[in-house]
Image (tube, coloured by chain):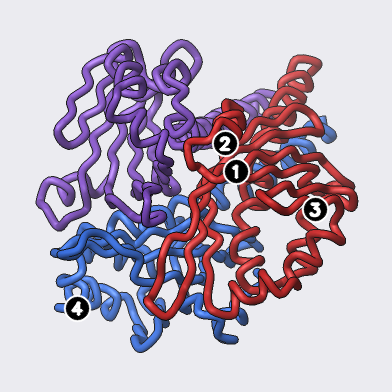
Chain colours: A blue, B purple, C red
Amino acid sequence: MTDLAARLDALEHRLQLAEDKLAITQLIASYGPLVDAGRADEVGQLWTEDGEYDVEGWAMRSRADIHAMVLSDAHQRLITNGSVHFLGPVWVEVAGDEAKAVCDSLLVLNGEEGWRVARGSVHRFQLVRDGGAWRIKHRISRQLDGSQSSRDLLPL
Amino acid sequence: MTDLAARLDALEHRLQLAEDKLAITQLIASYGPLVDAGRADEVGQLWTEDGEYDVEGWAMRSRADIHAMVLSDAHQRLITNGSVHFLGPVWVEVAGDEAKAVCDSLLVLNGEEGWRVARGSVHRFQLVRDGGAWRIKHRISRQLDGSQSSRDLLPL
Amino acid sequence: MTDLAARLDALEHRLQLAEDKLAITQLIASYGPLVDAGRADEVGQLWTEDGEYDVEGWAMRSRADIHAMVLSDAHQRLITNGSVHFLGPVWVEVAGDEAKAVCDSLLVLNGEEGWRVARGSVHRFQLVRDGGAWRIKHRISRQLDGSQSSRDLLPL
């Protein structure tokens, strides 16, 4: 009996880890479709209340800042012309209630001469379990232009 | 004993959900490689017999229609020159024997002047458990050109 | 009791399979970010000691060869200017200590005229469980230019 209970404990622990990885994968997979549809509320909910997003030339320091970014003229101009914030599959590591993840992205824009790749970037996320859901605590994005700052985001 | 059995039931239920999410992720990950290789049979099997695919200017109403699309002159021309139907990671939600999923895609084409992005799109899938396997019941794709119809595919 | 133990065995087997799929997904998701950051050691560790990588015009026959590729002038030139080796979600099948996986990729390069897609490819991986970790035993990559050799990588 004890033995079965111990095996169940171990299985539960392993399953929790797999579920956490899947949940974080899904969270990050939802960012692109949501941000290109201009869903400011849902994008904001991906971050914690005090979550941060450091992207070149733009330092957002709260969920409210991220919400405002989606509604900003700069972002609205992108998505009105047509944009794909295309994030790749994530590489993720979970430790208890914290996690780290890395992925690449392409920013692909629509314009008068058709679609073009405007930027290739790498992203590093720190996530926390926040009231039952995983949320982004900190995200940093750097253009993959050969700069040291982009390389410093690796390895996980 | 009862307690262990109840814990096992709960674990089985959670594991089933994780397996379903993985299976749907894999199903959608197989679409691009299969369709670019012209594998009409395998692409057709991703849909139910009466599955639908609504892509701009093309309404497919059955597995047979999807099979015919892969063999069509229009599709064959794309893949003979060289194409990547590049679908991103999916955001998926499962409820029993039904599921919904959303992802972005890029259509990247080879031509005389090299490779170019021909289109950026968002896709919404409805899936069903069909004889032990997950299959697509309905898929709608819209170009991410700022149109309301593309935005209406979100949120999940 | 026996019945519970048998159910636990079955659950453990299913969970192991899900964990293997996740691990392989993560392994392949890490390749792009690592190779664009020039992390030769970590890229090498993705392959077995005798692992192979057959990419058009370049046949690597060991981990040492893959390590050397990352440090090569050709690769260093790419990543110094800026590159994204953008691999898509994998379609993976596991059988015991072996696995197969397929995914698409885009090679996106930075240059004087901005970013451009330099190549679209399909990749087929053979993987093995190697001392507790999954590693690549063989990888073949072919440009998606309509060639038979690219189509022959499908289905899984």
Judged from the image, the secondary structure of the residue bearing numbered disc 3 is strand
Q: Which residue was labeled with disc 4?
A: A74
Mark 2–mark 1 contact, CB under 8 Å?
A: yes
Judged from the image, the secondary structure of the residue bearing numbered disc 4 is helix
**Which chain's residue wears label 1?**
C
Instruction: Please rate how many residues cluster around mark 1, counting C-alpha atoms within 10 Å: few if below 14, some from 14 to 19, many from 20.
Output: many
Q: Which residue was labeled with disc 2?
A: C150
**What quarter of the picture does the N terminus of chain C occupy?**
top right
Q: Say what amino acid the circle numbered 3 marks.
A: Met
Q: Say what amino acid the circle numbered 1 marks.
A: Arg
Nearer to us of marks 4 and 2 is: 2
> Does label 2 or label 1 sit earlier along the sequence?
1
Horizontally, residue B76 falls left or right of residue B14, namely: left
Q: Say what amino acid the circle numbered 2 marks.
A: Ser
Instruction: Please rate how many residues cluster around mark 2, counting C-alpha atoms within 10 Å: few if below 14, some from 14 to 19, many from 20.
Output: many
Which labelled disc corresponds to residue C109?
Answer: none
